[in-house]
Image: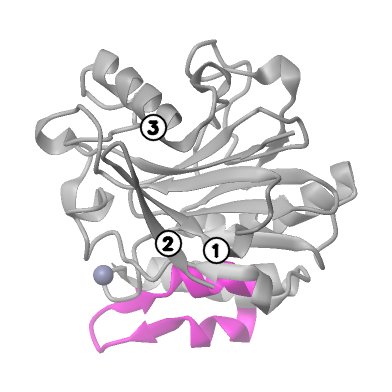
Amino acid sequence: MAFIEQNKNGVLFHESDLFAGRGGILHAFTTRIGGVSEGVYDSLNLRLASDDDPSRVRENYSILARAVGFPVERLTLPDQQHTCTVRAVGEDDAGKGLFRPRDYEAVDALVTNTPNLPIITFSADCGIAVFYDSAAHCIGAAHAGWRGTAGGIMARTVETMCDLYGASPDTIRVAIGACIDKCCFETDDDVADVMRDALGDAAAQFCAHDGKKWHIDLKAINRHHLLQSGVRAENIDISPLCTACNTDLYWSHRLLGERRGAQAGVIMLLK
Ligand SMILES: [Zn+2]
């Protein structure tokens, strides 16, 4: 398992080879490289809720869609608010959040079994993941900041794919994109306490104290929730990159604050 770098028309993104040879989908984890935004938003900023020029952000979506091969006008967005809410979307939702108003809010993961309906999840340090069950032919895209990570949104996404579409944890594959890693995710007691409340004794293996601060391993906690929900270890791929260590490739909320863009993971069933 590995994240493979792709460069199409100057757009730099990563694909997980976990999905290689499974022709039923396309997917990509974006970087900052290849868009038209400038300054702190240089350059493939996908965050409309920034003070970046909205026309540039929309152009970035079109550039990304051409590079990856999805219909931008059908891209369907979540409304990320650090919840553990998973929403199923279908044909009626195509384009919501970008080209059409959303009639839902506080949704941090999307699932669908509708072909040609790209779904997306955004990050600027938070964990993100895309899901695919090639047997049940359904997909998911989930956002997991530390609250969503603690709350188990990864497992909720698996459960929703199983409940609605007949997916099985045995056959679901999950690629977790770059996020802030334990090297840079330093916290006070509050985050460690939430992890302990959520995970019990298991939290100790994911939260290390250096004498002053906690270092929390979000990727490992999300992996833990996936394993607990029955996803096989060999069907989970995790980007090795830390967003805060690689600001040439990624925006980091921790380093940049509110004046920052966002990268994303996108996935679509082809047919
Ligand atoms: Zn780091």
Look at label 2 and name its amino acid. Ile
**Residue at 67 percent of width and 70 percent of height:** 235
Does mark 3's beta carbon lie closer than 8 Å to ligand 1? Answer: no
**Residue at 24 percent of width and 43 percent of height:** 33
Q: Position of residue 135 (x, y in %)?
A: 84, 54
Q: Is residue 83 magenta?
A: no
Look at label 1 and name its amino acid. Asp
Q: Position of residue 35 (x, y in %)?
A: 25, 32
Above or below, 246 against 221 in this view is above
Above or below, 169 against 202 in this view is above
Mark-to-mark CA distance, 1 and 2 = 7 Å
In primary-sequence order, the first of circles 2 and 3 is 2
In this rendering, the count of numbered labels is: 3
Please state, as top left, top right, bottom left or bottom right, where the C terminus lies in the image.
top right
SS at badge 2: strand
| Left or right of 98, for residue 211 | left
Residue under numbered circle 1: 17
Asked whether disc 1 touches disc 2, contact meaning CB atoms under 8 Å apart, the reply is: yes
Q: Which mark is residue 64?
A: 3
| Left or right of 66, for residue 244 | left
Q: Position of residue 54 (x, y in %)?
A: 28, 16
Look at label 3 and name its amino acid. Leu
Can I make out residue 131 in this image? yes
In primary-sequence order, the first of circles 1 and 2 is 2
Residue under numbered circle 2: 4
Q: Which residues are the magenta region?
A: 200-225
**Residue at 86 percent of width and 42 percent of height:** 164
Q: Nearer the viewer, residue 269 or 181?
A: 269
Q: Is residue 219 magenta?
A: yes
SS at badge 1: helix
